[in-house]
Image (tube, rainbow, N blue to C red):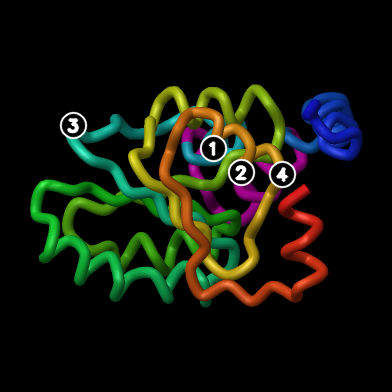
Amino acid sequence: MGTPFLYKAWVAASTAILPIAGRQSMAKLRRAGVEPSRAREKLGHASQPRPDGTLIWFHAASVGESLSVLAPIDRMGRALPQAHFLITSGTATSARLVGSRLPPRTRHQFAPLDAPRPLKRFLIHWRPDAALFVESELWPQMLHRTHARGTAMALINARLSQRSIARWQK
């Protein structure tokens, strides 16, 4: 089966608007007091090195979702003392709040925009061994490209209707 038309359309549209969306998202973060090097994370540029060993990625959107993963990461960190953790989120507020509470061996990066180049940069740099998507923070290319790399993936605390599940399975 080939790639669905809607996915191809999403890739084309996100590629076309990336120059504008990238500038706008970085400007918004800078207006919120985020350093330029951190704002560039929206384009997939990492501002910190990837740790050696296993890396488990938690992707959350909001402040609440981001904060909700701290306790599970803390427990996983105790159970898996060699593992490292990455939290991605989209807002300056979530980055500030999570950043001040990070469990040991945990890093935060702004989530890359759902476009080919930012996601490619992000995935090449971080090479996550597992990806956990919180609630319904689902982006087509992020899911497709993460899966294509062979990364184990799971939804946590997800609330999807049967109709949404059927659409995502196409």
Q: Which residue is mark 1?
A: 147
Q: Are marks 1 and 2 in contact (CB under 8 Å)?
A: yes
Q: Quadrant of residue 1?
A: top right
Q: State the residue at coordinates (45%, 56%).
A: 132
Q: Going from the N terminus, do you reach mark 3 or mark 2 first? A: 3
Amino acid identity at mark 1 = His
Q: Going from the N terminus, do you reach mark 1 or mark 4 first? A: 4
Q: State the residue at coordinates (17%, 61%).
A: 77
Q: Quadrant of residue 144?
A: top right
**Magenta span:** 23-37
Amino acid identity at mark 4 = Pro
- Which disc is residue 52 wearing? 3
Q: Which residue is mark 4?
A: 140
Q: Is residue 87 magenta?
A: no
Amino acid identity at mark 2 = Leu
- Which disc is residue 143 wearing? 2
- Which disc is residue 91 wearing? none
On screen, 57 above or below 65? above
Q: State the residue at coordinates (42%, 45%).
A: 152
Mark 4 is surrounded, within 10 Å at the Cα level, by few (under 14), some (14 to 19) or many (20 or more) other residues, namely some
On screen, 101 above or below 113? below
Q: Going from the N terminus, do you reach mark 4 or mark 3 first? A: 3
The answer for how far apart the CA atoms under marks 3 and 2 are is 24 Å
Mark 3 is surrounded, within 10 Å at the Cα level, by few (under 14), some (14 to 19) or many (20 or more) other residues, namely few
On screen, 33 above or below 124? below
The answer for how far apart the CA atoms under marks 4 and 2 are is 5 Å
**Horizontal side, residue 7 vs residue 92: left or right:** right
| Residue 100 position within the rendered picture, expressed as x and y whole percent measured from the top left | 32, 65
Task: From the image, state whether disc 1 or disc 4 is nearer to you.
Answer: 1
